[in-house]
Amino acid sequence: MSWHLGRLVGFDLETTSPDPLTARIVTACVVRCGGGQPTESRAWLTDVDGEEIPDGAAAIHGVTTERARAEGVDLRAAVSEILDALADAAMDGLPIVAMNARYDLTLLDREAERYGMTPLVERRGQLRVIDPYVIDKQVDRYRPGKRTLTHLCQHYAVPLGDAHSADADAIAACRVAWRQGTWHEQLAGMSLDDLHQAQIGWAAEQAASLQAHFRETDPEATVEGAWPVIPRQASDGGEIAGREITTRSG
């Protein structure tokens, strides 16, 4: 059976900033769906470890500092539970679907580092990721327009409920991935292992292309190409542009 017809595990975060190296988790969702089985979803609203949620971030996902402090669970506990949920998925042989996985999985990795927890990439189970963003840029690289989750939902005819809520976005990402596997035979014919490895190369190529574009105006521009998690030794700061990590002069 092709991977897109089996069980998928959607993962999404809403956070305090677009920089995955420093942002904190505000809300999160891990959802198991598809494969002819009932949808199972778990969501978290955290206290952000007492930090402030900037007005700009709150305007996107709707969670204010006041609400997080009043209703949120302990962020440390949430990070531990999210890591466990994703590790359980990997142990069960299920792929994790994350839109622009480099952002969400790197941010989760840095939260784990802050709390001294074993990172997801070092836990038992084989981590295999499906990233609709990377896949879309590969299979339809010359299509004009944006490639946000909202735009991908429109392109792949996927309904998107409450955009920028972690639970709605996690399910929508799975549905987009399903559509991609349905529409593109070359994807459906790949094993999960092969698809994961292919995305590592595709993401690196896409980053190199974006870096070349930036260097037309800034010769010192760099774009991080690691996927799905930026290694800790590689994250030495930088500017974030649209959830793409860049280091640019000036």
Image (spheres, grey):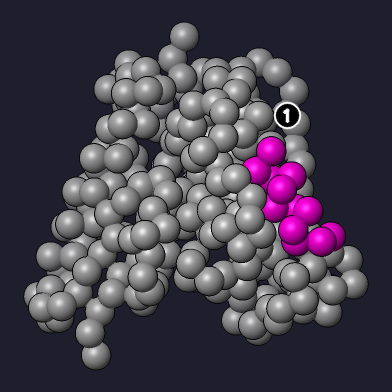
Residue 71 is at least partly visible in this image: yes
Task: Please state the extent of the stretch shown in magenta in the rendering.
Answer: 73-84
Examine the structure image and report whether residue 75 is included in the region drawn in magenta.
Answer: yes
Residue at image location 73% in from the left, 69% down from the top: 48
Residue lying at the far front of the rendered structure: 116
Is the magenta region chiefly helix, strand or loop? Answer: helix
Percent x, y for residue 162?
Answer: 68, 56
**Quarter of the image holding residue 120?**
top right
The quarter of the picture where the C terminus appears is bottom left
Percent x, y for residue 210?
Answer: 21, 62
**Quarter of the image holding residue 91?**
top right
Percent x, y for residue 175?
Answer: 54, 35
Work out whether 155 lies above or below 248.
Answer: above
* 101 lies left or right of 25: left
Percent x, y for residue 200?
Answer: 30, 40
Label 1 neighbour load within 10 Å: few <14, some 14-19, many 20+: some
Q: Looking at the picture, tell me which residue is in the foreground, 95 or 50.
A: 50
* 37 lies left or right of 140: right
Work out whether 112 lies above or below 88.
Answer: below
How many marks can you see? 1
For badge 1, the amino acid type reads Thr
Examine the structure image and report whether residue 195 is included in the region drawn in magenta.
Answer: no
**Quarter of the image holding residue 40?**
top right
Residue carrying label 1: 39
